[in-house]
Amino acid sequence: MNKLTTKKYVANHSPENSKIAEYTTFLSDSIVEKSVTIIVGQWDQSSHYVFYQLTSNKFLVQRRFNTADGEVTKYISTHLVMVRNYSDTQRVIVCSCGHYHRHNIPCRHIYAVFNVEPAAFHCGIREQKKFEAFYNKDETTINYTNECNRILALKLKGPVLQLPLIIKNDNDGTSSIPFQQFNSPLQRCCPINPVVVEKEDEEKESEMNEHGFGHIFDRYNDDDDANVNGFASTMENDDDADFEFNPSKPVANGYMSIQPLVKECSRMITDEGKLAIEKNGSTWISKS
């Protein structure tokens, strides 16, 4: 094997890729193909997240960006992972992101907290190949069907993990990351890096004016048009009419700043929680 093929082999067979291939092969025997792709992908992405341990059964999980790279603003949010009782030897793990509720598959936030490998029993009963093959088929599978119905009636909101639960130390930011950086995105969507808006190139602007496109929308601000369709008069009565949004203004201090239009937007939506959006002094509250 020459140097070129050796380099290509190492790139395609890194320890990370080999681990993913191993999990994919192993899980393909038990759960459906689509679910295999999702659960392995969630486990792989969990390495990019850190958590802050609030109590023995509550963790705040957040994606960690090393630095601001490029011109695209990245936003950061915090999710709450909770441990709930299930049996003497098992616990149900619930995450506020709702991934398990939508897909019956654990999310990256759960795998970021607990040091477990992806397993077929982490997924819901409907994702199992046995369910696809034997559920409610005929009289010979009635016992299996009844057991599945018992599990479905529980309406589990997360995967069931065996005790003892071991946290993933590599992702533990409890002692190294300030609590405020986890707590702030629970109440607002925080940009992780400044918003960069480039000024329009003068040459392109002059070219647009030459062809008559530079001021094509100016006529919509005329009083005559406002009287015809009533659009401008409606805007005058709007609560946000006096609000000026400046997209060219950079956002400083990514963890503590928010977008000017929306002052507060909670991403922590749980069974007991609520979604609150505060906009220009008015508050709308929607209970989940």
Image (cartoon, rainbow, N blue to C red):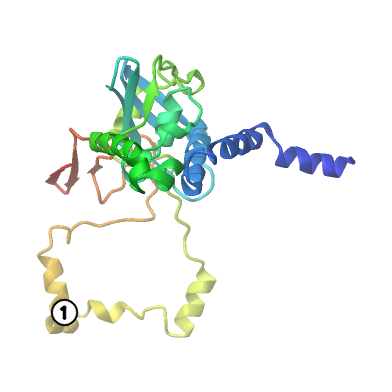
Residue under the point 30% across and 28% down: 183
Residue 27 x/y as whole percent: 53, 37
Q: What residue is at 54 percent from the left and 39 percent from the top?
A: 29
Q: Say left or right for 61 vs 243.
A: right
Helix, strand or loop under label 1: helix
Corner quadrant of residue 275: top left
x then y, percent, for residue 84: 27, 23
Is residue 201 shown left or right of residue 88? right
Per the image, the residue denoted by label 1 is 226
Of 88 and 131, the residue lying toward us: 131
How many marks are shown on the rendered structure? 1
70 relative to 96, above or below: below
Q: Is residue 98 visible?
A: no
Query: Where, by quadrant of the figure, is residue 2 drawn?
Result: top right
Placement of the C terminus among the 4 image quadrants = top left
Closest to the observer: 153 or 178?
153
Q: Is residue 238 above or below residue 68?
A: below
Residue 225 falls left or right of residue 35? left
Q: Give the percent coordinates (x, y) of residue 266.
A: 25, 40
Q: Which residue appears at 36% of the width and 31% of the height?
A: 159
- Measured as percent of width and height from the top left, residue 122 is found at 41, 32
Quadrant location, the N terminus:
top right
Left or right: 84, with 31 as reference point: left
Q: Nearer the viewer, residue 64 or 82?
A: 82
Image point 35% across, 19% down: which residue? 53
Q: Is residue 265 above or below residue 93?
A: below
Q: Mark 1 belongs to which amino acid?
A: Ala
Q: Can residue 42 be seen in the rendering of this structure?
A: yes
The residue at the far right in this view is 2
Residue 269 to residue 196: above or below: above
